[in-house]
Amino acid sequence: MFNNLSEKLDKALHVLKGHGSITEVNVAETLKEVRRALLDADVNFKIAKNFTNTVKEKALGQDVLTTLQPGQLMVKIVKDELTQLMGGDAEGINLSGNPSVILMSGLQGSGKTTFSGKLANYLKTKKTKKPLLVACDVYRPAAIDQLHVVGDQINVEVYSDKGNQDPVAIAQAGIAHAKANGHNVVIIDTAGRLAVDEAMMTEISNIHNAIQPQETLFVVDSMTGQDAVNTAKAFNDVLNFDGVILTKLDGDTRGGAAISIKSVVDKPIKFIGTGEKMEAIDVFYPARMADRILGMGDVVSLVERAQEQYDEKEARKLQKKIAKNQFGFDDFLNQIQQIKKMGNMKDLVGMIPGAGKMMKDIDIDDDAFKHIEAIIHSMTPKERTTPKMLNASRKKRIAKGSGTSVQEVNQLLKQFDQMSKMMKMMQGGKGKAMMQAMKN
Ligand code: GDP
């Protein structure tokens, strides 16, 4: 996420480190670099200029803070301003109605349908709501099918009416269906076009007027940079929407949209999409995003993601197994699944302070566990619980079945053995012995 921008800002701010005090000269130099970094990230020129002017004023007005390193002070000022630019505090969505109606808007391909599913899944699991998805794209039957596929995946009902050509009527019937069937949230997915045009704006505006949603969200592909900002403006002029959803932040995004959109439409970014899977949704926290852009990682989100996957009962069961030396490959497989649910690997590594920068050139395969999983899947249940029984011919069979080599099987067995020993030591609280084992 925002690798280029992070790198350039890091370089720009680096210049100040080592200087004794903040002077007009080195502030000007730094800010020139900061502005260039923002422009390269596709931030609007006026916004970039205002940003650096504000930072400059603040930096020069703070000579009282001589105890701090100037570099650190600059980073703090830049971070605070960046946070402000992206919205200040995180803002939730309005779920006050019964049902609360959420209308999705945006161009075709922006990720509306995917996000509708993600939001339904999020509300169902996090807020214990009973959502209904409504398919209002009357032009592309495939779009309706897509929403049904999404709904099946997350176990959320989808209301559609394939023969009906009137999106307003479908939206209204969807809401009536929700009321009659005890759904307390209705998420309405609408048709988008490839570019802003009058017909689309009239249609979405008609739906908006007819159903008066509690929350209107504008979904936009963050990869589209300044275009994203222009589209946001066009939709906001018609809908006066409540919040922005930035999708595809897992891609090679330059960051311009995330940084500029709030100040152009004065509406908060509420959620971000970070992948194609239904779990790849995050509440947008401007301060955390600023940390990430400045290469400071985002430990809070990382811990939260880990906690989401943490099940106390399961953890206790696992602990007992480890203590009894019964931790097998099935448990290992289970753990891998949990880690995978936390998000894509590159994204997770980027949340560790400094790690994003360190590992920027290392290709972290999102399917890093593919071989391990294949090897374990090729084992019999007995082999999974009793790895000791894996003799040469069994290993050969497993390698063949998993499309790997005996070497890879051996490597996994060795790692598993080391890990089991380490876990056992941790259980016994033998910290020193564990450190020793890690060194070996
Ligand atoms: P719609 O036309 O606005 O409904 O867009 P879709 O929901 O069909 O999404 C268009 C494409 O973008 C699909 O291939 C999605 O899988 C993909 N997509 C949506 N959100 C994300 C995201 O956050 N990250 C990535 N990598 N892909 C996404």
Image (cartoon, rainbow, N blue to C red):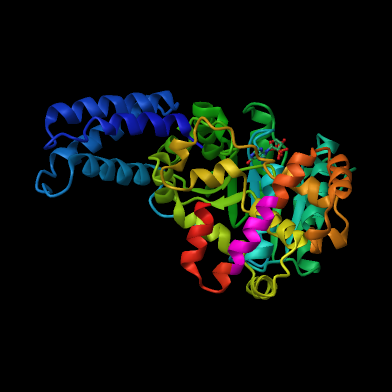
- Judge whether residue 167 can be spotted in this image: yes
> Which residue shows up at 49% across the image and 36% down it?
359
Q: In this view, does 354 lie to the left or right of 392?
A: left
Which quadrant of the view contains residue 179? bottom right
Which quadrant of the view contains residue 262? top left
Magenta span: chief secondary structure: helix
- Residue 423 x %, y %: 60, 65
Work out whether 428 lies above or below 234.
below
Q: Nearer the viewer, residue 210 or 218?
A: 218
Q: Is residue 63 left or right of residue 131?
A: left
> Which residue shows up at 64% across the image and 54% down it?
339
Whether residue 233 appears in magenta in the rendering, the answer is no
Q: Which of 414 and 286 is in front in this view?
A: 414
Instruction: State which image quarter holds ligand 1.
Output: top right
- Residue 69 x %, y %: 18, 44
> Which residue shows up at 65% across the image and 62% down it?
420
Q: In this view, does 163 lie to the left or right of 340?
A: right
> Which residue shows up at 47% across the image and 39% down it?
356
Which quadrant of the view contains residue 213? bottom right
| Stretch in magenta | 414-424
Work out whether 431 lies above or below 354.
below
Work out whether 90 lies above or below 106.
below
